[in-house]
Amino acid sequence: MNQISPLAYVHPEAKLGDNNIIGPFCFIDRNTVIGDNNVMQNSVTINYGARIGNSNEFFPGSSISTKPQDLKFKGEDTICEVGDNNSVRENVTISRGTASKGTTKVGSNNLLMENMHIAHDCVFGSNLIIGNSTKFGGEVTVDDNAVVSAEVLCHQFCRVGSYVMIQGGSRFSMDVPPYIIAGKEPIRYAGINIIGLRRHGFSNDLIDLIHNAYRILYSDGTREENINRIKSELQVTKEIQYIIDFVQSSKRGIIK
């Protein structure tokens, strides 16, 4: 049975699962689907088009599936998907999609800290930690297990790779490849995320292999020449192939 405060508003067309807690002054709009065991503390807004999974906790002031902050948006019928076991802290805003992709997606087991923003048509993975007041422009992709610190500004259309650590206060408009630390001003490659990789069970040999891949990637020579060197000089594990594919598919280019 759901526990719904008499001070909350739930639209009659909203679809709720079981065992949800909906606190006072929450607003749940029509065309919303909410799974089981979610907790919505006071003053949470679940807007039109939200698709919420299970066992998420939404803190006061969070607003999910907001109308996109995009002048090209003309009211098209789009959605915002949020997975399971996310902690969505105070005043977090997540926009729904536009005609570009139709959906904003956030995976599972993420910690989205206070006052951060995910814009329209973004695709966020799982096991992410996003710091306070960090903002992502439209159509950004963040792969699994990334850590983005506080007050980071990410330009639209960028991609952030898995297992990265991005320093607080950074600003970037290029892609951040996987397994690295990115920081300083202007933002740049600052080494391998050794501590993060060890915490996730990467062996020392694999960490050394990744380090060697980036040593070659950021050496003299064109990006294509350096990729070819990686392929010829190193064992191409799935991790190394991920780096290669990430760099070769980058449309904005990777940080220096």
Image (cartoon, rainbow, N blue to C red):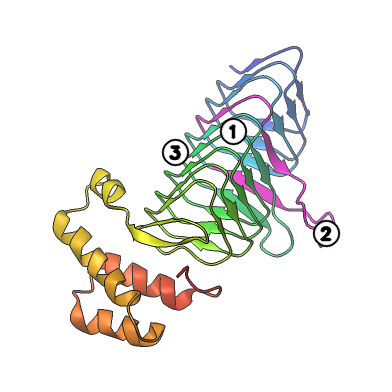
What whole-number distance in Å separates the C-alpha atoms at marks 3 and 1? 16 Å
113 over 198 or under it: above or below: above
Q: Amino acid at mark 2?
A: Leu
Residue sitting farthest toward the front: 185
Question: Where is residue 97, by image quadrant?
Answer: bottom right
The circle drawn on residue 109 is: 3
Q: Amino acid at mark 1?
A: Glu
What span is colored magenta in the figure? Answer: 54-82
Pair 2/3: label in front: 2
Compare residues 241 and 97 and report the one nearer the observer: 241
Asked which secondary structure carries label 2, the reply is loop
Query: What's the residue at 63%, 36% (across, down)?
Result: 115
> Which percent across, then down, holds residue 84?
49, 37
User: Residue tagged by mark 2?
Assistant: 71
Magenta stretch holds residue 63? yes
Query: What's the residue at 27%, 46% (across, down)?
Result: 195
